[in-house]
Image: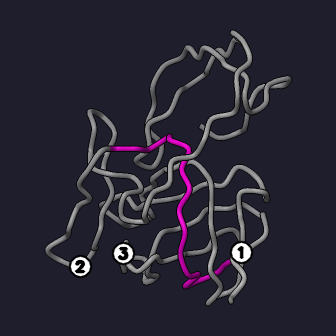
Amino acid sequence: MGGGPPEGLKAGVRVNVLGGLKTISGERGIRNPLVTKVGSDTPPQAYPMTNRALGGGPAGQQTGVVDHYSLPREMAKGANNIGLLVTSWGRVTAVAYDWFYMDDGNNLDDGTGHIGVCVSNGVLERPSVGQYALITGISGCEIPAGSPVARRVLRPRNSGDIAVVPPH
């Protein structure tokens, strides 16, 4: 969780990861990972997913995400895909310093007042409200402060994972 790959590792290098499990803000991760290189391979390909498919329902100790926050809350269904490399898309509905929201027409409501899926992009480039974007990143979740449920988060790895789709 967090940080990026150990020095000398990049996309396409196969590794073994050993460590204990922990949960931070609703998302399971590996604590104190010991990473060893075991070979090279082709980089993993991202799975295309609609906004609603991101996150998924609960799986073991990993929480699921909420589809609609208003009562009665609608929890997501389907396979939990937190930690998977995915590509999703949509029209940008809100932008801030280190995140933006995009909606592909599913009108997801995570209780923040923004419609769509949160793209947590650190300080990478951000599209403008109204633009369409194609985002590749890690499917994740987090529990916002004061919320009892987890929301979807898509985490791009670098600026190359954020593509603004020009209008026709």
Task: Determine the secondary structure under disc 1.
Answer: strand
Amino acid under label 1? Val
Amino acid under label 2? Ser
Taking 36 as reference, is 157 above or below it? below
Taking 6 as reference, is 122 above or below it? below
Q: Nearer the viewer, residue 112 or 119?
A: 119
Q: Nearer the viewer, residue 69 or 116?
A: 116
Direction from residue 87 to residue 163 in the image, left or right: right
Whichever of callouts 1 and 3 sits on the residue coming sooner in the sequence is 3
In the figure, residue 101 lies in which quadrant?
bottom right
Residue 117: give x, y in percent of width and height: 48, 69
Taking 81 as reference, is 144 above or below it? below
The answer to whether mark 1 and mark 3 are in CB contact below 8 A is no
Q: CA distance from mark 1 to mark 2?
A: 31 Å
Residue 1: give x, y in percent of width and height: 59, 37
Q: Nearer the viewer, mark 1 or mark 2?
A: 1
| Disc assigned to residue 108 | 3
Q: Which residue is mark 2?
A: 70
Whichever of callouts 1 and 2 sits on the residue coming sooner in the sequence is 2
Task: Determine the secondary structure under disc 2.
Answer: loop
Residue at the location (42% across, 63% down)?
50
Amino acid under label 3? Leu
Q: CA distance from mark 2 to mark 3?
A: 11 Å
Q: Which residue is mark 1?
A: 164
Task: Determine the secondary structure under disc 3.
Answer: loop
